[in-house]
Image: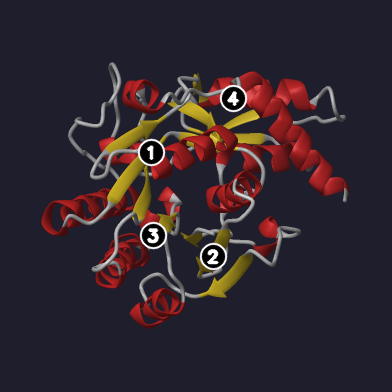
Amino acid sequence: MCTYLITGGCGFIGANFVRFLLDTEKNAKVINLDKLTYAANPDNLKGVDDTRYTLIVGDIADDTIVNKIFAENDIDYVVNFAAESHVDNSIQDPLLFFRSNILGVSNLLNVAKEHWKETNNKRFLHISTDEVYGPIMDGMATEQSPLNPSSPYASSKACGDLITLSYFQTYNFPALITRCTNNYGRFQHEEKFIPKIIKQVQNGEDITIHDSGEQTRDWLSVYDHCRAIYMVLKEGKLGEVYNVGANHPYSINEVATMLLDYTKTKMQTSSKIKYVKGRKVDDFRYSLNCEKLKTSLGWEPTISFDQGLKDTIDWYIQQQSK
């Protein structure tokens, strides 16, 4: 039986990965360390096998609680999802992001390093973001592209990446990193774009879009992302970074239009698109080259954006009716 420490497992991507992991490995044991901030919800993991799943409420920056977890459990794998992740919030309170995304990552790495000194076959996967590359106006960012973060959020994630890689270089620590594009799917907090505009339509409100709406993102199903995380965790080369994207580039306008058109087939709504002033920092375009993940590990996305978006809308509508 392998024991996994999943941090931030009550959040959107973390909860989906915990479910994926427990479904994939029938003997896996999962310890979920989560601070339970506003964006986390223990109900995201309601109904999982509690004989193999334990929630510990705590902060990854707290070395006492992290040391206790490692001392009391033979941790085989760490997957670090724990992060403050909303760009708008990082502009208002950057120090909160630096504590979690820099100090928290450093603490996890340091505690794991100390407890794994005499052991082999351990792995630590840090989950990062395409935002560390900054805006990509032409072409695609590869894993070798320079880091050029624009917001306090993105800069804190870039710092976490560099610290993680430094532990591999300095201590031969068994670290890996994934950098993903925009995720969507079940359990996402309503501050994020797709669930936010689904809720606006459900409430009969206008869909609000920042500035022109021509900002372009690559939209990755959280299920496909979980598959990629699992492959990298198990088979990735230590010390390496892997980009994860679906090559589904759509503008904010296109996504809002697709969502509105499909939702109108499910319910009566008078919602329309309304443009509002955007945030201080809003990178115009992100795009990742994911050939490394495809050629080295054989991963490819399996869910089209059209179908994935419809499935996501259906899930949120069903949640409201419960």
Q: How far apart are marks 1 and 2 (CA)?
A: 22 Å
Residue at 68%, 22% (x, y): give it. Answer: 307
Q: Mark 3 points at which residue?
A: 92
The residue closer to the viewer here, 84 or 5, is: 5
**N-terminal-most mark, 1 or 2:** 2
**N-terminal-most mark, 2 or 3:** 2
Residue at 31%, 25% (x, y): give it. Answer: 292
- Colour scheme in the image? secondary structure
Label 2 vs label 3, nearer the camera: 2
The residue closer to the viewer here, 274 or 92, is: 92
What secondary structure is marked by label 2? strand
Q: Is residue 276 visible?
A: no
Mark carried by residue 32: 2
Amino acid type, label 1? Glu
Q: Mark 1 points at which residue?
A: 235
What secondary structure is marked by label 4? helix
Q: In this rendering, would 262 be left or right of 61?
A: right
Q: Where is residue 58 in the image (x, y as percent from the top left)?
A: 49, 75
Q: Distance between the residues labelled 4 and 1?
A: 34 Å
Depicted 129 relative to depicted 271: above or below: below
**N-terminal-most mark, 4 or 2:** 2
**N-terminal-most mark, 4 or 1:** 1
Image quarter for residue 243?
top left
Q: Distance between the residues labelled 2 and 3?
A: 28 Å
